[in-house]
Every structure is written in structure tokens, then in C-alpha cells.
Amino acid sequence: MLETAASWAHAQLRQAAGKTVTYRRGLVTCDLTAVIGQTEFESQGDYGVVTKVESRDYLVAVADLRLDEQQIYPQSGDRIEERFGETVVTYEVMAFGDEPCYRYSDLGRTTLRIHTKGI
């Protein structure tokens, strides 16, 4: 029941706050609806220096992420293109520190949170 409620809540969020973006791997693309978020990553380097990085995250339905009619999962180096008026800004999917480039955002594993950085 909790999984169903989380799935319903994300669908409502996508409908209310979703934005159409283009997911790209090489020359192959797909348009999908994403909710924009952010995650702050922190890592400690040599001599105790702490570095903070903030990623632009895209929350998308697992079922929507398809290239050439095949279900895919994000890979570092993939791109997400987001339109701001007449301008298209490209973000690269990437892992930060020891974290992977994406994670599930719900217990039912129906929503991905994809981490990116503007390029």
C-alpha cells in the first residue's frame, strides 16, 4: 500500500511540477517528464579539506527512461537537455564521490533520481 501511495504521489508531482527534458546517450534520445531537484555531496580530501558539490537532479519514472524502445538506466556521460525559453542547457550525468550517478527515490523503485552537472 505504501508503494502505491508513493507512486501516486510522484505521478501527481510530475503532473504539477514536471518539466519535459531530453535524455541523450550518444545520438539516441527520448523526451520525458522530470521533476527538478538537487543533492549536496560532501567529500573530505587530503589534509582534511572538505569539498561540497551540488548536483542538479532529475526525478523520472523508471518506465519512461527508454532508448530505442529498450528500458535503460543512467550511465555517467549521458546527457540531459533542458530548455529555458529559447536556450537549451545541457547537463551531464555523473557520479559524485563514492556515490553512483543515480539512485532510486522510492521503496517501490519506480522513480530514479539522476545526478548531473551543467556543462
Image: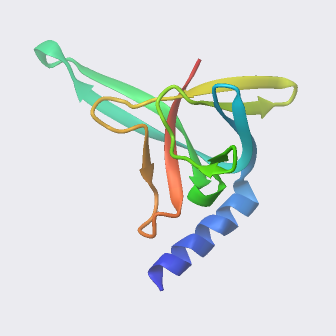
Residue 67 placement, left or right of 73? right
Image location of residue 30, percent across then percent down:
72, 42
Image location of residue 15, percent across then percent down:
74, 62
The residue positioned 36% from the left and 30% from the top of the image is 96
Residue 44 placement, left or right of 115? left
Quarter of the rendering containing residue 100: top left
Quarter of the rendering containing residue 104: bottom left
Image location of residue 89, percent across then percent down:
71, 24
Q: Is residue 79 above or below residue 15?
A: above
The residue positioned 40% from the left and 36% from the top of the image is 40
The residue positioned 66% from the left and 24% from the top of the image is 90
Quarter of the picture holding the C terminus: top right
Residue 41 placement, left or right of 56? left
The colour mode here is rainbow
Q: Is residue 77 above or below residue 69?
A: above
Q: Residue furthest top?
A: 47
Quarter of the rendering containing residue 106: bottom left
Q: Is residue 26 above or below residue 62?
A: above
Residue 99 placement, left or right of 10? left
